[in-house]
Image (cartoon, rainbow, N blue to C red):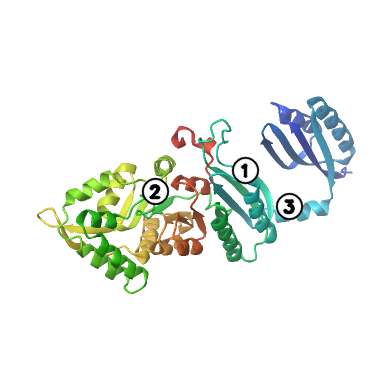
Amino acid sequence: MESRKEQILIRIAGKDRIGLTAEIMTILAKYDAQILDIGQADIHSTLSLGILIRIDENLSGQVMKELLFKTTELGVNIGFEPVPDDEYEAWAGRQGRNRYILTAIGRSLSAKQIEAATEIIAKHNLNIDAIKRLTGRMSILHPERNVRACVEFSIRGSLEDRADFQQELMALSNSSEIDFSFQKDDMYRRMRRLICFDMDSTLIQAECIDELARRHGVYDKVAAITERAMRGEIDFKESFTERVALLKGLDVSVMRDIAENLPITEGTDRLMTVLKTCGYKIAILSGGFTFFGEYLQRRYNIDYVYANELEVGEDGRLTGRYLGEIVDGRRKADLLKLIAMTEKVNLAQTIAVGDGANDLPMLMEAGLGIAFHAKPRVKESARQSLSTIGLDGILYFLGFKDSHLGDQGRL
């Protein structure tokens, strides 16, 4: 007759030491215990270890006795809890369903910020299964180093209103200097392959048409047209055509000088290094100009650049006209899909990053759309937002840890 088996949850906590888990496992192996679940965390050399075992009920008493002696010897605490069959089955049935990852980023993270985030999680009846830090540890003696903090929550549960949940996170982000990314924990989240960037005010901290206008002495006129477009008096194509016309006669050498002195956004160098090392395809999809996009392409070995091309006359000066189709919001979304198709990448594996209203179509189309230091309306509409740190904060949304990046991702 087969002996009856039971489940026992073992909890161990205390000062960590090398070999502790191995010594616990030696005892469990001796009695041929089946490991149903195991999890371990180490916070400031303090261990928290949980093991759910299934074992012959005739042996369980002896196992617990030996574990108690061993943990006393090791100087850690241990606790035991029986888990009935029906309780285990109900728990097992919930695993793997409706799992999400919530990433929280800031220059620093306070208890007040974490409290607010976890209250939103609890309000929507979601359970936190695990929390891990993605950024390196801050220095107390040198607070100017590693000025960023990021933690990742692994969450489980049935989310009835995802839009409402994300809206609450965005509201907290706006009021508390904390950024969030909320993603379904599926295979696509772990296998992003294509990332598409806006250029002006995203990869660079400038609007190229404004810089050109300043050099040509027509900035006020260009700014007035931009304002009319923002008020909805004229559409993007009309405003773009009028602004480009004002650049007529500008020498191309001015464009070269601007390109060589572009203010690169914080974190761009680190982000590009890691993405290229990890095999990502990178694209610039910009309503700006190809001249500047191609300069960044050479600098960062970017795979694709789609932007607006200014016509240059035989005298080396701008004609006030452009060539080809204007890259507007709809065109950006179409290009993202086209590149994904060319690279044989599922749309769920794509990322889009931008700051303006004309970026929203591609942010909505991508598997992961990130509003970067975006205008309020864009931030409200986007599903993910990054405003507290530089562009390399995207790495944490992708699950990278500072400790994994090594020399490629040094701050």
Q: Which residue is mark 1?
A: 132
- For the residues carrying marks 3 and 1, which lies nearer the camera in this image? 1
Q: Are marks 1 and 2 in contact (CB under 8 Å)?
A: no
Q: Which residue is mark 3?
A: 92
Q: Residue furthest left?
A: 315
Residues 193 and 325: in front is 325
- Amino acid of disc 3: Ala
Tell me the quarter of the image containing the N terminus. top right
Is 111 drawn above or below residue 126 in the view shown? above
Using the numbered discs, state the Cα–Cα distance from disc 3 to disc 1 in whole angstroms.
23 Å
Callout 3 secondary element: helix
- Amino acid of disc 1: Lys
Measuring from the top left, give residue 211's x and y in whole percent.
Answer: 27, 54
Callout 2 secondary element: strand
Q: Which residue is mark 2?
A: 281
Question: Residue at the location (33% across, 69% down)?
Answer: 229
- Amino acid of disc 2: Lys
Q: Residue 175: tell me if it is visible.
A: yes
For marks 1 and 2 on the same chain, the one whose residue lies earlier in the sequence: 1
